[in-house]
Amino acid sequence: MRRLFKNATILTMTGEEPLRNASLVVAGAEIFYVGTEPPEGRYDETVDLSGKLLMPGLINTHGHAAMCLLRGYGSDLPLQTWLEEKMWPMEARFGAEQVRWGTALAVVEMLKGGTTLFADMYDHMDEVARVVEESGIRASLCRGVIGLGPEEERREKLAESVRFAEEWSGAADGRITTMLGPHAPYTCPPDFLGEFVAASERTGAPVHIHLSETAFEVEQNVRDYGARPVEHLDKLGLLDRPTLVAHAVHLTDAEIELLAERDVKVSHNPGSNLKLGSGIARVPEMLRAGMRPSLGTDSAASNNNLDLLEEIRLAALIHKGNTLDPLAVSASEALRMGTLYGAEAVFLAQKVGTLEAGKLADFIVLDLSAAHLQPQERINDVISHVAYSAVHSDVLDVYVDGEPVVRDGVCTRLDEEKVVARANEALAKILG
Ligand SMILES: CSC[C@H]1O[C@@H](n2cnc3c(O)ncnc32)[C@H](O)[C@@H]1O
Ligand SMILES: [Zn+2]
């Protein structure tokens, strides 16, 4: 299948300037051409994108999709209370059905908001993978493991994490990649984390873990293990593995240097960190140290949505306010965080994250006609429009692997009405 998208404003995310009156040619799952002089030839489909913007799909690098079922439950609590008194007791009642429909609900929301790739850490991951297969989205998945139980249970969970990573890697025509998911240094004892390091060495799977999300967690780690979480993980050899850390809010200068040196990938989750009162990550310092932090929503229970455009806007705003520096995170940097740096964070930068010939055709089309995106004269910067003004309902079409998964704001492969009904039923069942 060859498709020509023409007359668009295109943000390739390879340079600063948008291309005007530009074209994108997709052949099969790949981008064949992007620029202003499309090759002559026959196309199976030609799409006129006058008045529209075409850009790489958004990449959500940290979340727990099935927790969509817990949206609006347990709000306004700090992380530890929220987890221990609200989330974990409810999650203990989740089975495959809750994870399946909670995840489907999340995927509908993410796709419609322009997310083409999400990273997920949860239980019953076979269900999550099946939703990814069916919906057409791309995902980096790991079985999240809390290692606070008895030895036997821990061993089973680690084995399950490895089985999942090996069995699903490359599934759904390559749309699924996998990682190992020890939940956090405060839920996985050091010897257990060491076993994840060994499993990562053996399988080649990267590690996805929560890190230094709250001041409490850092103090607890010092009390329990005599080191802050970053040093703790480094001593265990975990940071020598390809690693994605979620949050990384409470870091010292030396820790930022170390994470940069180890090429550790960060998922910055501004919405969740604000809602749980965890703090504001030192993103400007990370950028100055040469790191390329990506963006995540975390779950809908702590955010309360899965809207990457909103995280881009938050990232571009909160660090200016926090540092009193309007240059702290620019609009174009925030857009890179939501696209290219996201691809790097899930180790897929060779394949997605920018629009370039040879890369996979994961892209979105935004309608620029709404009042809140005007005017569009020479002085009005389209990058600024996307970062500060665009909202999820501006997303018209979403393509993954060159195939439309959202058209005119409607999911092509998931039935939204059915997903909403089943998600509500699945939650009702466990509430009794
Ligand atoms: C073991 S599966 C994942 C596990 O993570 C929990 N979770 C959700 N949000 C957060 C967060 O912000 N920090 C730490 N842990 C979080 C979720 O409830 C699952 O149990
Ligand atoms: Zn999380």
Image (spheres, rainbow, N blue to C red):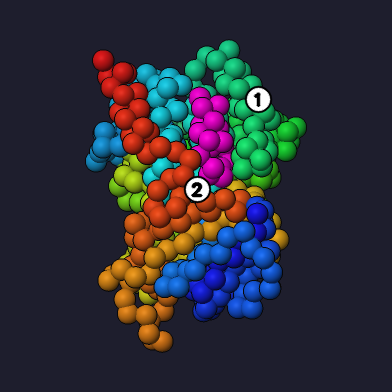
Where is residue 301, by image quadrant? top left
Disc 1 residue type? Arg
> Would you say residue 305 is visible in this rendering?
yes
Residue pictured at 26% horizontal, 37% vertical: 72
- The image position of residue 351, as x and y in percent, is 66, 55
Location of the C terminus (image quadrant) = top left
Gap in angstroms between the C-alphas marked 1 and 2: 29 Å
Who's the residue at 45% across and 73% down the image? 50
**Residue placed furthest toward the bottom:** 378
Q: Amino acid at mark 2?
A: Val
Q: Is residue 265 visible?
A: no
Q: Residue, x 50% and y 48% (percent of image)?
A: 405
Which secondary structure type mostly characterizes the magenta part of the structure? helix
Residue corresponding to mark 2? 405
Q: Foreground residue, 415 or 9?
A: 415
On the image, numbered disc 1 is attached to which residue?
163
Residue 427 is inside the magenta segment = no
Q: Quadrant of residue 86?
A: top left
Q: Quadrant of residue 331?
A: bottom left
Disc 1 or disc 2, which is closer to the eye?
A: 2
**Residue density around tag 1, few if under 14, some if 14–19, many if 20 or more, within 10 Å:** few
Magenta span has 127? Answer: yes
Look at the picture and state if 205 lies above or below 393.
above
Image location of residue 305, percent across then percent down: 34, 46
Tell me: 353 left or right of 271. Answer: right
Lower sequence index among marks 1 and 2: 1
Callout 1: helix, strand or loop?
helix
- Residue 46 as seen in the image, left or right of residue 82: right
Q: Residue furthest right?
A: 202
The segment highlighted magenta reads 124-141
Question: Along the horizontal axis of the image, is 336 left or right of 29?
Answer: left
Q: Tag 2, which secondary structure?
A: strand
